Amino acid sequence: MLPSPQLKEVTVRDYLVIFKRRSWVILACFIVVTFWFVFQTYKKIPQYSATAKVLVERNTPSIMPGQQLMIPSQIDREYIQSQLNILTSRTLAKRAVDSLALAGDNSFVKIKEPENAFLGGVSVNLISGTQLINIGYISTDPIKAAKYANILTTEYIGQDSDKRLEFGKSAAGWLEKQVVEARKKLKGSEDALSVYMQQNSIVAVPDIDRRQQSGLENAKSEKSRIESELAELSKRYKSQHPKIIAITTRLESVNKVIEEETNKSLVLNEKMMQYNSLKREVESDKNMYESLVRRTKESEISKDLETTNLRIIDMATVPKSPFSPNRRRDIQTGMMLGLFLGVGMAFFLEYLDSSVKTAEDVELYVKLPFLGYVPSAKQEVKLSKDPRDIDLICSKMPNSRVAEAYRSIRTSIIFSCPEDRSLKTILITSTSPREGKSTVSTNLGIVFANANEKTVILEADMRRPRLAHTLGVEGKEGLSTFLTGASDLDAVIKKTEIPNLFLIPSGPRPPNPAELLTSSKTRNMLTELKTRFDRIIIDSPPVLTVADPAIMANMAEGVIDVILSNALNIDIILKGRQRLYEAKAKIIGIILNNVNVKKEDSYYYYHYYYAEEKEKKS
């Protein structure tokens, strides 16, 4: 498990330890997910995609000046989007299906909704920053993919041409109607001008205007001449003189003429304005008529031409390889997902796992000294022919790594107690059954015996005895018979095949082991054994199952708690530790049993190396 941030800062090394420990989870997830993706990828039917390319041009033919036939001159976003929608419309799909049927392809004929079936393989998209549209078709048959893409493209352009041709014909008919209307209007304006000229006796407008202007100018000139002559005569004659009276009469006559001519000019101008208005209307109607006639002739010429602003750039070709499934990409995706899932699962399992696995876990959570570890003996089990060899591995396989680990633990035990303090009596217990405490007791007895210490193993687990069978001694007499007074101490001490190693077996199973252990004979026995042996190893039952360990722990000079690696919840282990504290036990440390060294961190190698160095120095 990851250390709590309150206890220790999480480092990269902690994560690497998790990766190493949970490597099987990561590998399993990686393999399962990858193979699932491989299976799904090869299970899929290959899909082929063929694409044609069409250009949507800007310019389109026009019918009237300033007017366009179909679309704006600028290709805007809305227009392009409209074209994309047309390409995926049921109307165009029906044209394509009908065209395929005429060509002998009846793939969609028997389908209930052939248009929808055809559109299921259509894919269209605008190439960004251009006026080019990709028209694609997806099919399980590469030949059909190219064929259907080309059919859709040609029908798309054909539909656009038909639409424009229909509009051109409609425009031609509209122009013809407009020509008839313009002709009628021109005729009406011409007739109105002719009637007006007749009513006002207008024959030649320029001559009338010129004569009118000439008469008025002559009268004004005459008036000026008479006024000059009057001025000269007035210098010589009085106003009553006959010459003065005569010239004055002539001046009045000229003024009347000027007034008459001016009135005539005003009337004439009014008529000319009306005339010019009618004439301009005639000219305007004439120009419109001539323009419509010209456009009608042009429309008659162009209405049968197929005009379109769509142009095929590339026709679809038969694809050589499928675009889906992309097996390389899918498998790579599966590998990445499998790896991520494996790492995530590893961390999740680590989060759920609160068991003790490493020496660091012992120091951080159990908060007791770490005496050493016993590695997993799987390799030794494979090499052994007798199952008892594992329980006696320090004797049967003295050069094995397991035996080296026990010797390292022996050194840690020796250095765990000051020289002035006795540590002859050591009780071996565990939190729960099947943690390997009996095997640890046996092999610790062997390594102490190998160090020339006279050692006795006291089998205090009278509920599940097994050491007599393991060490090959008679077990009829033992601890139970001694405590009940049926045997003396010398009778229950059994010599084993291993030099310096003795065993006191549990003897017959009593009905009340705890009551026997609480007797004074137990304490007296331990006192006597101290005088005979250098080291006393007590194999005690698990601390949480019965009361026996709490009774014996108070009598022993030191207690060792065996913890099966990667097995028990830390809370259960702490309950066992608390039970020993309540019994006032002198706990000297923890032994981790059955450790998978390859999966755990390098702390074990560090611990083993320095423990061996200490043993050599001692």
Image: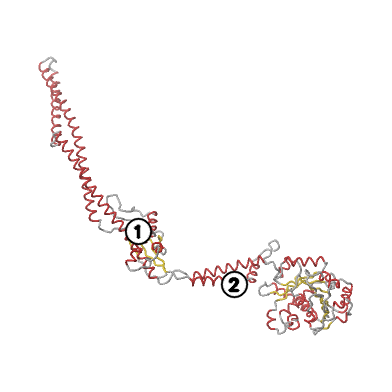
Of the residues under marks 2 and 1, which one precedes in the sequence? 2
Label 2 secondary element: helix
- Position of residue 213 relative to residue 389, above or below, is above
- Horizontal and vertical percent position of residue 498: 80, 84
Task: Look at 54% across and 72% down and name the residue there.
Answer: 35
Residue 609 in view (yes/no): no
Can I make out residue 294 in this image? yes
Q: In the displayed structure, does residue 2 sit left or right of residue 113?
A: right
Separation of marks 2 and 1 at Cα, in angstroms:
54 Å
Q: Is residue 523 left or right of residue 588?
A: right
At label 2, which amino acid type do we have? Ala
Pointer 2 with pointer 1, Cβ within 8 A = no
Percent from the top left, x then y, of residue 16?
Answer: 63, 69
Picture quarter with the C terminus: bottom right
Nearest-to-viewer mark from 2 and 1: 2
Q: What residue is shown with label 2? A: 28
Pointer 1 residue: 56
Provide the secondary structure element on which disc 1 rests.
strand
